[in-house]
Image: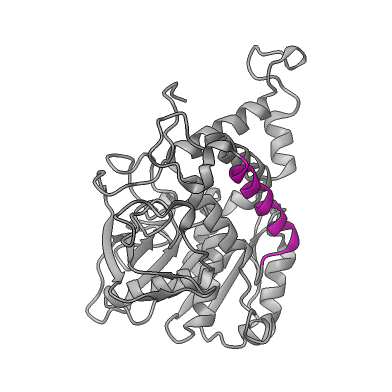
């Protein structure tokens, strides 16, 4: 990693190179009421598209990113995009999300930090300063409502498919429940119908680490010098998360008890696993935002399709889409029992597609061949 000081935030800010992002103002001139009672005066969504929308607007596929993803699901690194697309193997001509067949849309989520309205975005009610710690609580349902406004802006009344894993899977499921007649197929991976106690606990600890960093400053840190932002707190959060995203066996086989290079752990050096966690902590701090980490983690904790709908079973009875449910056999964060519950309660009672992998929860991002087979089968002509 570079030795340059870590910036206070890795958020994309207005005036920076937009890369392949497009922007849509999907709500303005009146308050957008949020589920938990707050509101936003204006909402801008950053999104990217690939392929061509057909004349009947019937070939659109919505791809939904996970916690630290963004709209750049496909394409090379370059100005505006420090890394290759996070799902590059899935999108493009001849790939599972075939851009010769489909018009693929990937938005940055509400509360995100890569161009969509979130804590790092200018607050139009306060002379354009970032919302910071004043950004209101948002839920998965709020995010899906904003995505539905984007669909209208793009002239899409019904999605051929909505696809996502982890937090993206939460939104794919919520789409199928909230807008049952606007989704033909939902591909829901590595998630459950509601956040579990353990998932909430892990997110709560991560958010506590950020909030306890004295450089977090109550969420108002965007104007500080490089090196003076809350990267230590977010680094601890990422280390905790990274352990939960991978399987114990993978970490054992990759790192075991090996030292990092010539370092001696018995004399103050690091084990290889510590170096791995350090790398991911710094990498995230340079491309993400601490406030967004908190806002989106809390949205994931609030995930419950049954809230206010008579419970999970009653909520899932609303679904009219063909639903494909996939899980990962080594996922300790979202274990297979959660996907099995979905399959039992969905009206179509789909067969659970199990992805065999050593990589744990992250397998939906890594196991391109297995994930590709699932998508291909779901979207076969």
Q: Which residue is at the front of the view, 351 or 337?
A: 337
Q: Is residue 58 depicted above or below 294 in this figure?
A: below
Residue at x-position 26% and y-position 71%: 53
Residue furthest front in the image: 126
Residue 362, image x, y percentages: 59, 49
Q: Which residue is at the front of the view, 259 or 100?
A: 259
238 falls in the magenta region? no
Q: Is residue 92 depicted above or below 171 in this figure?
A: above
Seen in the image, is 11 located left or right of residue 366?
Answer: left
Q: Which residue is at the front of the view, 177 or 126?
A: 126
Residue 27, image x, y percentages: 32, 72
Q: Start and end of the magenta stretch?
A: 195-212
208 falls in the magenta region? yes
Prevailing secondary structure of the magenta residues: helix
Residue at x-position 60% and y-position 70%: 325
Is any atom of residue 86 visible in this view? yes
């Amino acid at each position: 990693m570079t030795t340059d000081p870590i910036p206070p935030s890795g958020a994309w800010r207005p005036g920076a190179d937009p890369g392949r992002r497009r922007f849509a103002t999907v709500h303005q001139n009146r308050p957008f009421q949020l589920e938990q009672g707050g509101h936003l005066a204006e909402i801008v969504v950053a999104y990217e598209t690939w392929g061509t929308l057909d004349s009947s607007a019937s070939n659109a596929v919505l791809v939904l990113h996970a916690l630290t993803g963004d709209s750049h699901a496909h394409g090379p690194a370059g100005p505006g995009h420090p890394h290759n697309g996070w799902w590059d193997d899935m999108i493009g001509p001849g790939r599972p999300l075939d851009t010769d067949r489909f018009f693929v849309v990937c938005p940055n989520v509400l509360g995100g930090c890569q161009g969509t309205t979130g804590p790092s975005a200018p607050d139009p009610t306060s002379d354009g300063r970032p919302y910071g710690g004043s950004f209101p609580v948002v839920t998965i349902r709020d995010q899906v409502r904003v995505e539905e406004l984007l669909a209208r802006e793009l002239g899409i009344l019904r999605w051929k498919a909505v696809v996502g894993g982890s937090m993206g899977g939460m939104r794919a499921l919520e789409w199928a429940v909230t807008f049952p007649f606007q989704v033909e197929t939902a591909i829901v991976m590595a998630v459950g119908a509601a956040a579990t106690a353990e998932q909430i606990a892990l997110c709560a600890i991560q958010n506590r680490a950020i909030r306890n960093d004295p450089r977090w400053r109550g969420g108002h840190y965007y104007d500080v010098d490089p090196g003076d932002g809350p990267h230590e707190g977010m680094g601890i959060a990422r280390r905790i998360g990274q352990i939960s995203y991978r399987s114990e066996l993978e970490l054992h086989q990759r790192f075991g008890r090996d030292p990092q290079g010539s370092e001696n752990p018995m004399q103050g050096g690091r084990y290889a696993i510590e170096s791995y966690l350090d790398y991911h902590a710094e990498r995230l701090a340079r491309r993400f935002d601490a406030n967004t980490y908190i806002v989106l983690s809390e949205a994931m904790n609030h995930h419950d399709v049954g809230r206010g709908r008579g419970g999970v079973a009653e909520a899932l009875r609303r679904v009219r889409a063909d639903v494909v449910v996939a899980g990962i056999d080594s996922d300790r964060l979202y274990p297979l029992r959660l996907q099995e519950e979905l399959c039992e309660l969905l009206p179509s009672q789909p067969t659970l597609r199990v992805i065999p992998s050593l990589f744990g929860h992250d397998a939906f991002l890594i196991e391109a061949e297995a994930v590709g087979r699932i998508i291909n089968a779901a979207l076969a002509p």
